[in-house]
Image: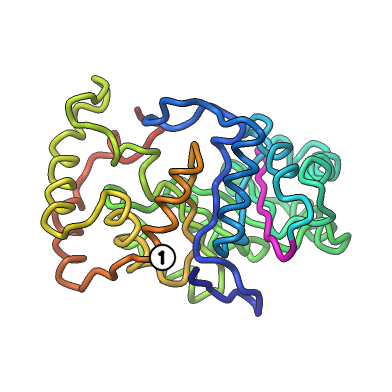
Amino acid sequence: MKQIIFNNKKLSKLSIGTVQFGLDYGISNTKGQPNQQEVNDIIKYVYDSGINCFDTAQAYGNSEEVLGKSIDNKDNIYLISKLKSELFINEVNKNVSKSLSYLNINSLYGLLLHDSKLLYSWKDEYTKLVDSLIQENKIKYFGVSIYTNEDFELALNNDVIQFIQIPFNIFDQRAVVKGWLKKAKEKNKLIFIRSVFLQGLFFMSTDKLPSNLEKSKQYLIKFNQYCEELNMTKSELALSFVDTIAQDSILLFGCDNLNQAKENIVSYNNLKQLNENIIQDITNDFKNISEDIYNPTKW
């Protein structure tokens, strides 16, 4: 498993997103939420495969609790959790302590705001809250999950924020077009990339799309054509595009079952780097996609 180094710590290039462990999640998920034993098997496999970074949130149902049971007695793990803005403002210490208890750990590697609301009215008292959490060793770093370019710019210019979670995939190329990756690297802020598979949209059959996503059909057909031409699976192409471009970032991926975890990790470990011409062709073919397609909140 490839690693990146952030402030002298070695983090796996892949991180497991755990929303599926606590909720029925993903447009292509037909099996629902895995049980505790299935999660235990998934975590054991990915941990043994070299993945040491895990992403969760209080909003992911009972994901923190399920994850906490499955990582018990595993060393050198980096855990990131998220709080909605209102939970940060109201009794943040209590809410962070709740996450630590569920996860059965003493300190979070990262605490992220699950939304960007507070970025637009940031106050000194919020900075003091973060500083206090760090001084008490409840968290190592603070960050935010962003959705828009305005969100990103506010996060970039907020000195308290060290982690920024962004969406980036073949259909959503704002990370490149808007310079998010380059700007974050210049300020030594670590990027976590979500939605590499666009919540499973890339895996859906073009004949079984719901009516609200019918407009994505032409792009999925084009995506499938690239897979055939390059002799790559959908997972491989989606991963390779993001990985080739975002070499200093951590890629989040979720899985509903052990087989999915195995497929994604095997695909990643055998990933072919795309050459500049292919990257440019893909970029050109998918650069003008409507937000109604690449933004799941619009579905």
Q: From the viewer's side, name the closer residue of 225 and 85.
A: 225
- Residue 188 image point, x, y percent: 56, 74
Of 79 and 259, nearer the camera is 259
The quarter in which the C terminus is drawn is top left
Image vertical order of residue 207 relative to residue 252, above or below: above
- Quarter occupied by residue 220: top left
Q: Is residue 172 left or right of residue 286?
A: right
Q: Where is residue 22 in the image (x, y as percent from the top left)?
A: 61, 32
Q: In this view, does 86 lie above or below 182?
A: above
Query: Which residues are drawn in magenta?
Result: 75-85
Residue pictured at 75% horizontal, 51% vertical: 126
Decide: is 243 above or below 65: below
- Label 1, residues with CA under 10 Å away: few <14, some 14-19, many ≥20: few
x, y percentage for residue 132? 85, 58
Q: Residue furthest right?
A: 136
Name the residue at 20% across, 53% down: 287
Residue drawn at (65%, 29%), measured in percent from left and top?
61
Tell me if residue 104 is in the magenta stretch.
no
Label 1 amino acid? Asn
Residue, far top? 211
Query: Compared to 101, does 226 lie above or below?
Result: below
Rendering coords of residue 107 (x, y %):
80, 57
Q: Left or right of 298: which side holds 3? A: right
Residue 82 falls in image quadrant = top right
Q: Which colour scheme is used?
A: rainbow
For this view, does 102 lie left or right of residue 151?
Answer: right
| Callout 1 secondary element | helix
Q: How many marks?
A: 1
Return the residue at label 1. Answer: 269
Q: Identify the residue shown where x is 55% and y is 66%.
A: 12
